[in-house]
Image (tube, helix red, strand yellow):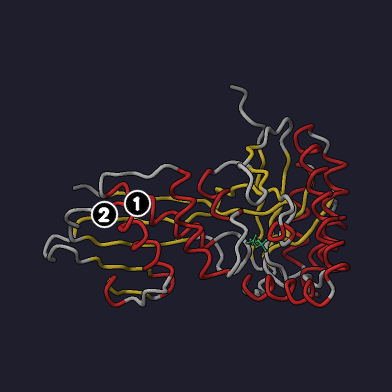
């Protein structure tokens, strides 16, 4: 049996984070400049069923039987094995690595699960479909996020821009004009579980007021889909800024996020907002290609810990 790889990109949410948990639509795109990789190969001198796990980035060197059952890596493996029900499981070694920042709102947890599920199902000779991989990763996401909307596992498993709404079929976006986005890490992070719980607390305390902001984000996302599909960058920029305003009202921004947004806009970004759970993590700035270098420079000067540009390409016409 040969070495098998599973790879999964990072993601950013362009519009609709948090509101998506409450049934509003959201738009997310894969980011292939960062990725999670799972590598599986036979463990020759070990007995059947043995599974070694190594993740150097987080100093983990263990075996499946030693990992707690609620550990997300254990869950991704166990759910895959439960679905395949192999008559015998060969001894194997799993190595996990990732360049996706942890806690930065770029889907690191979902990408790691997806890379593992993909590699393991392929190694055992029954490669799962994208939909199957996404469904299993969603189960693992529940440990990280409590009540995940499912957008992270979906965009990462399908590796294509999506318009996502809970309980509705995923829609794949048809982009008519490329756009450029600079992604900047604030170097601060708050677990998504916490920010989702903070919005829930606001909602429970004042459903009318919080609901109004969430619905507003939903409307912005609907308009943004139209602007993306029609290649209207100027309108898209205005919508990015409006989305950020609603996220501010929901108390999801932070001083550092605001500083980065201001810096990006001063350097010529058409619009900028936080992306993902908020209260830290990454900001995204929509920009014209010629402004990318100066925006990156300004963001670095403002204290972003990692800055890079990604291009959302036009959809291929089939
Ligand atoms: C996290 O990437 C996005 C949130 O909307 C949570 C979720 O959708 O599960 C904050």
Q: Which part of the image, by quadrant, shows the C terminus?
A: top right
Residue 266 image position (x, y, % from top left): 88, 58
**Horizontal side of residue 59 vs 43, given as left or right:** right
Residue 48 image position (x, y, % from top left): 14, 62
Say which residue appears at 30% left-offset and 44% top-offset.
126
Circle 1 residue: 119
Nearest the viewer among 318 and 199 is 199
Marks 1 and 2, how far apart in space? 16 Å
Say which residue appears at 83% left-offset and 52% top-offset.
271
Label 1 environment density (alpha carbons within 10 Å; few <14, some 14–19, many ≥20): many
Nearest the viewer among 219 and 66 is 219
Say which residue appears at 58% left-offset and 69% top-offset.
145
Point out the quarter of the image occupied by ligand 1: bottom right
Nearer the observer: mark 1 or 2; the answer is: 2
Circle 2 residue: 85
Nearest the viewer among 121 and 257 is 121
Q: Secondary structure at mark 2?
A: loop
**Horizontal side of residue 122 vs 256, given as left or right:** left
Lower position in the chain sequence, tag 1 or tag 2:
2
């Amino acid at each position: 049996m040969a070495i098998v790889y599973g790879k999964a990109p990072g993601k950013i949410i362009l519009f609709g984070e948090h509101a998506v948990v409450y049934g509003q639509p959201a738009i997310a795109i894969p980011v292939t400049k960062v990725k999670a990789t799972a590598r599986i190969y036979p463990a020759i001198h070990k007995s059947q069923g043995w599974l070694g796990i190594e993740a150097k980035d987080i100093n983990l060197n263990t075996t499946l039987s030693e990992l707690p059952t609620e550990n997300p890596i254990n869950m991704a493996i166990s759910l895959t094995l439960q679905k395949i029900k192999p008559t015998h499981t060969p001894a194997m070694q799993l190595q996990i690595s990732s360049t996706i920042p942890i806690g930065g709102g770029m889907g690191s947890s979902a990408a790691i699960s997806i890379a593992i599920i993909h590699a393991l199902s392929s190694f055992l000779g029954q490669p799962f479909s994208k939909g199957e991989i996404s469904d299993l990763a969603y189960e693992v996401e529940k440990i990280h996020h409590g009540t995940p909307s499912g957008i992270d596992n979906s965009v990462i498993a399908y590796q294509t821009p999506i318009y996502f709404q809970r309980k509705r079929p995923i829609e794949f976006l048809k982009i008519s004009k490329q756009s450029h986005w600079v992604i900047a890490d604030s170097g601060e992070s708050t677990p998504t579980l916490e920010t989702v719980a903070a919005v829930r607390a606001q909602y429970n305390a004042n459903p009318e007021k919080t609901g109004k902001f969430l619905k507003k984000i939903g409307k912005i996302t609907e308009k943004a889909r139209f602007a993306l599909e029609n290649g209207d960058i100027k309108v898209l920029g205005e919508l990015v800024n409006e989305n950020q305003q609603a996220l501010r009202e929901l108390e999801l921004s932070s001083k550092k996020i605001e500083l980065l947004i201001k810096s990006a806009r001063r350097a010529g970004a058409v619009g900028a907002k936080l992306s993902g759970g908020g209260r830290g993590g990454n900001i995204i700035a929509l920009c014209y290609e010629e402004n990318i270098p100066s925006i990156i420079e300004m963001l670095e000067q403002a204290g972003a810990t990692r800055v890079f540009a990604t291009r959302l390409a036009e959809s291929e016409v089939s």
